[in-house]
Image (tube, rainbow, N blue to C red):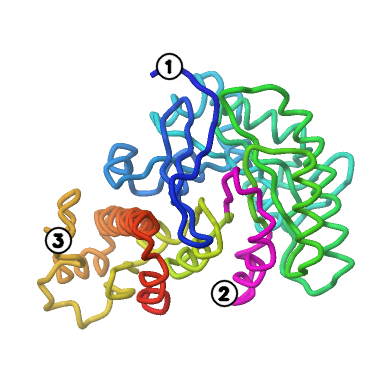
Amino acid sequence: MASKDFAFKIISKDKFARRGLIETHRGNINTPAFMPVGTQATIKACTIDDIKKTGSEIILSNTYHLMIRPGVDRIESAGGLHEFMNCDLPILTDSGGFQVMSLSKLNKIDKEKGAIFNSHIDGKKYYLSPEESIKIQLGLNSDIVMVMDECPKKSMDYKLIEKSMNLSLYWAERSKKAFGHNPHKALFGIIQGGLFKDLREKSLKELTKIEFDGYAIGGLAVGESQSEMFKVLDNIKNLLPNEKPHYLMGVGTPSDILGAVKRGIDMFDCVLPTRSGRTGLAFTWQGRINIKNNKYKKDNTPLDPNCSNLNLNKYSKNYLNHLFNTNEILASMLLTLHNINFYQELMSIIRENINNGTFDEFHDKYIDKL
């Protein structure tokens, strides 16, 4: 396929819910889309071939973790992240800002130098400026690059969140300059401002002046309630640039996704399906199942009898319960794959309902069930 620039188009709408298509030189991404998280150049317990068979069209990887291990030089020497992990899907890399906040107990934020922090692995000191974050992501050769931002913890301290939001805007400008001209890649801005309507509006307004290929909503999935998150989206859904993709970072549960799609979101990522798969929690159309519960010891039915993909319905709840209770590696592999497959099935049905103009009915049927 010939190389082409990044592009986005809306195919159909159902009120604020949007069915769209992102075009990249590595392949197209149907939206709303869910991106499985490959934090350290791998989606835990899964091969890329199996991930593709679930219908996944893009994955996410992590700047912070990859710069610490194995290091961008090592990945560049392999030809980039796609070659390193044998992945021909488009890859989005986050900027590292969230991990600096969530993982490093010893960190300092400097307006000019960026984030100064100690590795959670060995304590080594790192400097992550907006320019360095962009340089690393370009070195990884990711297809969608995120600006460097500061992601504060949930707080109702207005002045604290305002200061952080203004810093993120300053870093966004520097990120855009560092990104330069890369026609086959996209750079997304990140809207900050906590739970404050005016700060979110200001952040979005200033980011659109800088101009980005897409707009992400950051600073959520940090402890707020689902209703608080939806209120943030309600406050800006009329202001988000219609012609650009909208990405809600780090979210979430199936019901989070349904509510966010209703409010105009096109892209999602979350560790939940993979992390839950490793701990015995399965997502199904009947709700969540903790497969380690004793009641499944004699249940010889599959998690989803209608799922023929990857032969996942050949494994009974009884057998999966046994695998988890004996700490077998296959348990994590099967349930992780099941959960990612469920998420992609959910996204496919969401897109179908938007096309048909029936998304609200679908949303109302499943919002409290999933």
N-terminal of the pair, mark 2 or mark 1, is 1
Residue 54 horizontal/vertical position (percent): 29, 47
Disc 2: which residue? 226
Please give the name of the residue rendered at 72% of the width and 56% of the height, measured from the top-left corner. 151
Looking at the rendering, which quadrant does residue 276 occupy?
bottom left
Please give the name of the residue rendered at 81% of the width and 65% of the height, measured from the top-left corner. 198
- How many marks the image carries: the answer is 3
Query: Which mark lies nearer to you, 1 or 3?
Result: 1
Q: Amino acid at mark 2?
A: Gln
Q: Is residue 113 on the magenta stretch?
A: no
State if disc 1 and disc 2 touch (CB < 8 Å).
no
Question: Residue 123 versus residue 1: which sits nearer the camera?
Answer: 1
Disc 1: which residue? 2
Q: Which mark is residue 315?
A: 3
Q: Which residues are magenta?
A: 219-247
Question: In the image, 5: left or right of 188?
Answer: left
Residue 78 horizontal/vertical position (percent): 49, 20
Q: Is residue 224 on the magenta stretch?
A: yes
Looking at the rendering, which quadrant does residue 370 occupy?
bottom left
Please give the name of the residue rendered at 29% of the width and 37% of the height, measured from the top-left corner. 49
Q: Amino acid at mark 3?
A: Tyr
Residue 200 horizontal/vertical position (percent): 76, 61
Question: In the image, 286: left or right of 2?
Answer: left
Can you see residue 336?
Answer: no
State if disc 2 and disc 3 touch (CB < 8 Å).
no
Image vertical order of residue 234 relative to residue 314, above or below = below
User: Spatial distance from mark 2 to mark 1, Cα to Cα?
Assistant: 42 Å
Image vertical order of residue 272 relative to residue 301, above or below = above
Please give the name of the residue rendered at 42% of the width and 75% of the height, measured from the top-left corner. 367
Q: Amino acid at mark 1?
A: Ala
Question: Residue 271 versus residue 92: which sits nearer the camera?
Answer: 92
